[in-house]
Amino acid sequence: MIFKATRLTLAAALLGATTLGAFAEGFTPENPECIAPANPGGGWDFTCRQVGKSLQDQGLLDKTMQVVNLAGGGGGVAFAEVVNKRGDDNDLIVAASSATATRLAQGAYPGNTMDQVRWLASIGADYGVIAVAADSEIKDLPALLDMIKSDPTTVSVAGGSAVGGWDHLKVLIAANAYGIDDVRTVKYIAFDGGGEAVTQLLAGSVQAFTGDISEAKGFVDSGDIRVLAVLSPERLGGEFADFPTAKEQGVDAIGANWRGFYAPGDMSDAAYDAWVQKIADLYATPEWKEVMANNGLAPLDLQGEAFQSFVSDSVAQIQQISKDIGIIK
């Protein structure tokens, strides 16, 4: 049931594009800012920094976007900050992903719902990975899952989302697909962002890491970690062609993490439309296509109302998955 629901989420994520329409004239952010709701080094941090740099490089912003790391509560601290204190800030956008939808679906941001903010646009979909330290004796995904199946207490898996979050769900999807009936036995340890989770992996505090390919890439390039499996339907291209899929190892599991942005709920229509258009214009450039290819991002081109509807559907689907595994009732 978990795998089936996740396939539906992936299918929705990789459907075609939408367009916004006419550019909203008359608004330019004076002090553009992006909140990354985690510590440096994770996927949200990548989303803010890469998009901010690319917007300026392409002349879509005439000022440098300030990136503020605001970790805590699996994104909940940042969400509450935006809703309660910065609800009408026209210069502010916030990095979001499937992890954000997961926490909202599970009611993990106390008193907050997805309708309290405005959903701007997506910038791509990031496939999940399961990895180990480069010097680990665990050679492939079945070996890791066999260890979990035989004695779950001997294996801890670290991720950058809270318990029940998207990083957690990815390893549960793989375990379920491998025949581990009670996926609640999988030992998952949550950290504030993928960077911190990898640090604990390298320190030997945990045996494996679950995250997304964009946040894992730098640690692979530095020789610190080794990817056991990418949760994609088939091998990715380019720099990622050497990473085996879970599917080719006999584990029929797929997990794609969308990446995008939300804005304060009381942002003006002019500011909202302008931010949506800027992100849409960036997505359409060859330079952004190259960024996507270099960081393992799959196509996901949704803006404005289409993205709002997509997030709403994602929240509903993740609620069902979470019920299936007993995380919520």
Image: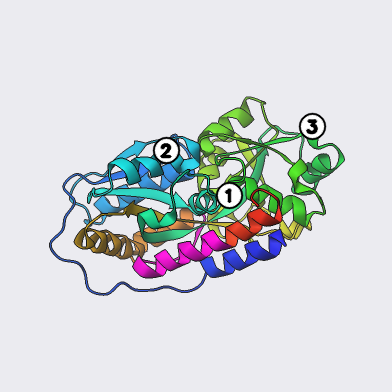
Q: Which residues are magenta?
A: 296-316
Identity, as a three-letter code, of the amino acid under mark 2: Val
In the rendered structure, find residue 166 and report the number of the disc placed on it: 1
Q: Nearer the viewer, mark 2 or mark 1?
A: 2
In this orientation, which residue lies closer to the viewer: 12 or 63?
A: 12
What residue is shown at x 74% (from left), y 41% (from top)? 186
Tag 2 or tag 3, which sits nearer the N-term?
2
Q: Secondary structure at mark 3?
A: helix
Against 73, is 301 above or below?
A: below
The image shows residue 139 at horizontal and vertical percentages of: 76, 42
Badge 2: residue crowd in 10 Å (few <14, some 14–19, many ≥20): some
Membership of 307 in magenta stretch: yes
Helix or strand or loop: what does disc 1 sit on? helix
Q: Is residue 96 above or below residue 270?
A: above
Amino acid marked by disc 1 = Trp
Residue 139 in sight in this render: no
Q: Mark 3 and mark 2: span between their CA atoms? A: 32 Å
* Side (left or right) of 287 relative to 59: right
How did the renderer colour the structure? rainbow
Residue 179, numbered label: none
Q: CA distance from mark 1 to mark 3?
A: 22 Å
In the picture, measured across the screen, residue 55 lies left or right of residue 205, that is left
Which is nearer the N-term, disc 1 or disc 3? 3
Disc 2 marks which residue?
77
